[in-house]
Image: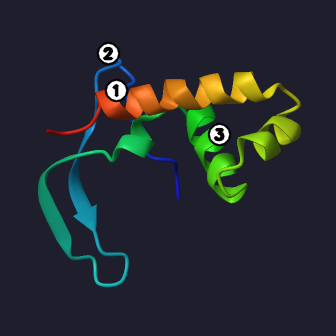
């Protein structure tokens, strides 16, 4: 399957899901659904979050994997946390 785009290719606006389809029986559910916060992150940030989870949340392990300093990893994680907090529905 293709990766879900989060931004409009024409104007860079936020995209919303308007239809879900069952792959087994082709039932369709329509509506207006906001993409989950993690899907709204850039592909690079999504990969970072995935690596973070797979390293059991160890910033030290992440720094070693990425070949950067611990503070660099911490700052990147803080930036992602800020993005996620900014996109949280109230």
Q: Position of residue 34 (x, y in %)?
A: 23, 44
Q: Earlier in the sequence, mark 2 or mark 3?
A: 2
In this rendered view, identify the residue nearer to me: 23 or 61.
61
Point out residue 27 in the picture as x, y percentages from the top left corner.
21, 76
Q: Earlier in the sequence, mark 1 or mark 3?
A: 1
Q: Dot 1 lies on which element?
A: loop
Give the vertical position of 68 relative to 32 (above or below).
above
Image-based side of 39 in relation to 87, left or right: right
Residue drawn 35% across the image and 18% down it: 12
C-alpha separation, residue under disc 1 versus residue under disc 3: 23 Å
Taking the image as shown, residue 25 lies to the left or right of residue 67, namely: left
88 or 25: nearer the eye? 88
Q: Position of residue 70 (x, y in %)?
A: 77, 29
Q: Quadrant of residue 82?
A: top left
Kindly identify the residue that appears in the image at 89 percent across and 31 percent down: 67
**Mark 1 highlights which residue?**
8
Crowding at label 1, few (<14), some or many (≥20) Cα neighbours within 10 Å? Answer: few
Q: Looking at the image, do the residues carrying marks 1 and 2 touch, with CB atoms under 8 Å apart?
A: yes
Residues at marks 2 and 3, CA–CA distance in whole angstroms: 26 Å
Residue at the image position 81 percent from the left and 35 percent from the top: 63
Question: Can you say whether 87 is above or below 19 in the image?
Answer: above
Quadrant of the drawing holding the C terminus = top left
Q: Secondary structure at mark 3?
A: helix
Q: Residue at x 26, y 37 (%)?
A: 88
Mark in front: 2 vs 3 = 3
**Residue 48's mark?**
3
Mark number displayed over residue 11: 2
Which numbered disc, 1 or 3, marks the residue closer to the eye? 3
- Say which mark, if any, is on residue 63: none
**Colour treatment of the image:** rainbow
Mark 1–mark 2 distance (CA, rounded to whole Å): 6 Å
Helix, strand or loop at mark 2: loop
């Amino acid at each position: 399957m293709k990766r879900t785009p989060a931004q409009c290719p024409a104007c860079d606006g936020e995209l919303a899901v308007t239809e879900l389809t069952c792959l087994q029986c082709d039932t369709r559910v329509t509506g207006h659904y906001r993409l989950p916060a993690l899907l709204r992150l850039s592909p690079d940030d999504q990969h970072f979050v995935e690596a973070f989870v797979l390293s059991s949340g160890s910033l030290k392990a992440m720094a070693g994997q990425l070949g950067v300093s611990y503070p660099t990893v911490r700052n990147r994680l803080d930036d992602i946390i800020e993005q996620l907090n900014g996109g949280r529905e109230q």
